[in-house]
Image (spheres, coloured by chain):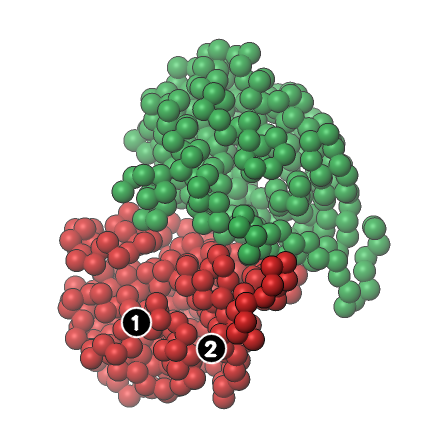
Chain colours: A red, B green
Amino acid sequence: MEKNLEPGRHLLYMEWYTGGDVGLFMKMNKVLYSAQSEYQRIDVFENPELGRVFSLDGITMTTEVDEFMYHEMLVHVPMFIHPNPKRVLVIGGGDGGSTREVLKHPSVEEVILCEIDPMVIEAARNYLPTTSVEFNNPKLKIVNENGAEYVRQFENYFDVIIVDSTDPTAGEGGHLFTEDFYKACYNALTENGVFSAETEDPFYDRAWVGIAYNRIKSAFPVTKTYMGFMTTYPSGMWSYAFASKGLDPLKDFNPEKVRNFEKLDTLKYYNEEIHVASFALPTFVKKLIGEK
Amino acid sequence: MEKNLEPGRHLLYMEWYTGGDVGLFMKMNKVLYSAQSEYQRIDVFENPELGRVFSLDGITMTTEVDEFMYHEMLVHVPMFIHPNPKRVLVIGGGDGGSTREVLKHPSVEEVILCEIDPMVIEAARNYLPTTSVEFNNPKLKIVNENGAEYVRQFENYFDVIIVDSTDPTAGEGGHLFTEDFYKACYNALTENGVFSAETEDPFYDRAWVGIAYNRIKSAFPVTKTYMGFMTTYPSGMWSYAFASKGLDPLKDFNPEKVRNFEKLDTLKYYNEEIHVASFALPTFVKKLIGEK
C-alpha cells in the first residue's frame, strides 16, 4: 500500500454526501494508515493537492491543506470572546488541530483534549504532524473518554468548551448533539463561560443545523450560529454554534485583541473582520434556524 | 438516454478540479440534453439532490438547487450600489440566472444578455426553466456575440455591467479575463457605473483570483474582492470582483434599500448583512490579492 502508483493509475476516495447523490472524490497517492478501531474505521492517505487526508468511517475529518479554515473558526471565535481563558476543554478533535489553535492563546494554562478513540490519537501522532504538533505540550492533557460522560464530572471549571465532533450520524458523534450533553457543558463552564460547536453544513445536512442550534439554545442564554468556508467538507460551507452564559460574540468582541495577538501571523483564515462577518447568515440559513 | 435507470444503477458525472487530484461527482438520473456547439460541449442532466445540472465542457455552471447563491451575489451586490440602474449588460450568463435577478430591480429599463453561444440560450430555454424564466421579458434583449468585442461598441451607456463568465481556461472564457476587456467595460459604463465579475475560487484556482483582481484594478479606480458560498463550484467558496468609477461597495451601501426591496422575499441568499460581510476576506484570500 505504501508504494506510489505508476503515472496514469490511481486509487480513488469517494465521500458520498448525506442523501447519497453527490460527493467529493480525491486521488489517493499513498495510503499511510488504514485500521478499524473499537469505534470507527480510520484512514490516512496522501493527495497531491490536499496533502495528508484523515478520514473516519469514510467521512473527511481534516486535510493538511485546508484544516486551518475549520480549526481557526471553531476555536478563535470563542477564545477571543472570553476575556481571559485559562482552562479549556476540547471534546472530539483527536487530530489535534483545535488544541493547537487553543494553545496559541497565552492566557491558557490547561487544555484537556477528550477524544474517545485512542487509535485516533495514535494515528494523529504518527501520521498528522501538522495538527498533532502540540501533543507533547505540558499544558495539554489527553484523555480517552466519552466526552458526553466526561464533561459531567466538572462544575464551574472550564472557561471555554469546544465541541469538535464527527457527524451526528457517524460513529459515536451522536452523543455530542444531545440536549443533555449541552446542559452538562453549561454546568461545566465558569461564570463567563463560552462554548462553540461544529453544527454541520446547511446544504446536504441542513436538518442538523437547526436541530443542533435549538438544542444548544435550550441550554444556553446566548446562542448564535456563525459560518465559514471549509473546502473539503460537504458543500464547502460550514456552520458553527457560539454559545455562552452571557457574553455576546459581537458586542463583547474587541478587535484590538486580535490585532495585538502574538500569533496573528500563524492564522491563515481568522481575522478581526472575519470574526464579525461570520455571524451574517445567508437568508436560507436564517430560515433553517428559525430566525426569519 | 431519457429513461430513468433501475434502482442501484447510476451514471456518474465527475468534475475534476484544477490540478486534477480532487473533484465533485454527481449521479446523473436522467440526461436531458447533450450536444457539441461551435464553442463547447453542453450537457443538462438531472440529479435527485441538485435538480437540473447544466455543464459546459464538463464544468458545472448551474444546478437548479444552488444557483441562487452565485447569481444573487454576482448581481445584487452591484445593483444595490448603483443609485438608479436603468441599463444593464450581462456578459456570459446564458442560463439566464443573472438576468432574472437583474430584472427584479424596478428601475431597470433595458437588459442586454450577451451570450456568445446560441446553443446555450436554446438549451436554457428548453431545459432550464428556473433560470431562463425571464427570456421573454420585453426589457430583455439577447444577443449572441463575443462579449469582449460587443462591449466595445458602447460608450457611457450602461449603468451596470455584470460578467457571468465560464472559467478563463474553458471554451471562450479567457476573453473575459483580459485587461483590454475590463477597460472596454469601463468605457461602456456611465459616470456612476458599477461592475461585477466572477473571479474563480481561491483554493483550487487560486492564481486567477489575483490575476483577475489586478487586471480589473488596472481599469477601475475602485476594485474590491468579495466572497460567497457556492456549493457545487470548486471548493464551495467563490470570489467576485466589485469595481466602479467611484462608488464604494460599503460606504455607498444603503441597507434600507434592501429592506424595502419589493422582491426581497424571492432572495434566498443575499440580504443586507451578507452584502457587508461578503467583503470581509479570510487572511489567505487577502494575500492572494496582495492585500496583506
Residue at left 41%, top 59%? A65
A201 with respect to B50 (left or right): left
Measured along the vertical axis of the image, is residue A73 above or below residue A34?
above
The N terminus of chain A lies in quadrant = bottom right
Measured along the vertical axis of the image, is residue B132 above or below residue A109?
above
Q: Chain of mark 2?
A: A
Is residue B160 at all visible to an observer of this figure?
no
Residue B254 location (% of width, % of height): 35, 32
Q: Residue flagged by tag 2: what amino acid is it? A: Gly
Q: Which residue is mark 2?
A: A173
A16 with respect to A151 (left or right): right
Mark 1 and mark 2: Cα distance apart in space: 24 Å
Label whose residue precedes the other's in the sequence (1 or 2): 1
Residue A111 location (% of width, % of height): 24, 77
Q: Residue flagged by tag 1: what amino acid is it? A: Val
Residue at left 74%, top 33%? B37
Residue B14 location (% of width, % of height): 65, 54
Instruction: Give the number of the mark in front: 1 or 2.
Output: 1
Q: Which residue is mark 1?
A: A133
User: B215 or A258: nearer the eye?
Assistant: B215
Measured along the vertical axis of the image, is residue B119 above or below residue A83?
above
Crowd rating for badge 2 (residues with CA inside 10 Å; few <14, some 14–19, many 20+): some
Is residue B4 at all visible to an observer of this figure?
yes
A32 with respect to B97 (left or right): left
